[in-house]
Image: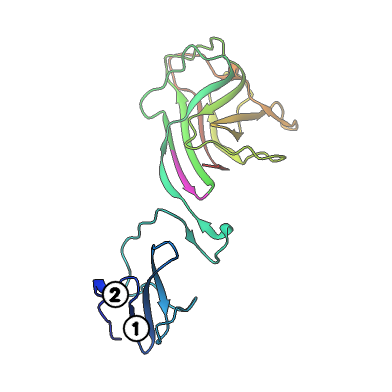
Amino acid sequence: MAITKVSRNLLGTGVVNNTDGGIIVSTDGYGRALLLPANENGTAEDNLHYIGSSSYRWRDIYLSGAAYIGGTAAANALNDYEEGTWTPAYSSGTGSYTSVPYAGDSRVGRYTKIGQMVYISGKIQTSASGVVHGTAGSALQIGGLPFAASSISNFTNPGIVVTYSAFFGSSKVPFAGDCIGSVIRLRHRATGTSNAEDSSATDLATSTGGTYNRLIFFGSYITDS
């Protein structure tokens, strides 16, 4: 397949093509550059040509806007992808803890954001120094979410599932949590047959001399960020 070089004086109006078609270098109504697929006559045509191939790939692509996948509507736009770390921290619904000590790698979190969906995982536990409840009250929470959860009418935002929990100050060990704002509100069952209810901020163990209040979890939620 022949390839024709595009010179600077063709930008905005030039055509690169052969008998199978090619590319139009054009502009939109605001003078912004457009790179369009074209037929052999230099006329733009839709949904036929490719960028690269399985044998000849482009290396990286940098976009400041969205990629429209499978359609041209707003619902087809993928406008964000991000990976990173976050630091989970115990907090209370009201008041505050006097001290929540952590040590070493006792707080680890990772996230992947695809569009409006945020996928998270984490580990958290307190150190041998011991928790001091102070004025902490209401719900037991984990703060530090990388993006604030959406407030969705008549719908509870997806949250987390706890895969491991141990060494809490009561038998009401968290097993799940709802994502609300920038925190995860932890939930437990008082008995094996009862409905889930909020864990209490005072459920954190205050013992010293070991690691306590240990959770490993994963989950997902929706954000407007």
Residue at 57% from the left image edge and 61% from the top image edge: 73
Q: Nearer the viewer, mark 2 or mark 1?
A: 2
* Residue 171 vs residue 104, the one in the foreground: 104
Residue 106 x, y percent position in the rendering: 41, 28
For the point 35% across and 75% down, the residue is 13
Q: Which residues are magenta?
A: 110-115
Specify which label sits upstream in the sequence, 2 or 1. Answer: 2
Q: Position of residue 77 (x, y in %)?
A: 52, 58
Helix, strand or loop: magenta stretch: strand
Q: How many marks?
A: 2
Of 59 and 25, the residue lying toward us: 25
Question: Do the residues under discs 2 and 1 have CB atoms within 8 angstroms?
Answer: no
Residue ID for mark 1:
17
Q: Residue furthest bottom?
A: 19
Does 168 sit above or below residue 206? below
Res 63 → quadrant:
bottom left
Label 2 to label 1, Cα distance in Å?
Answer: 13 Å
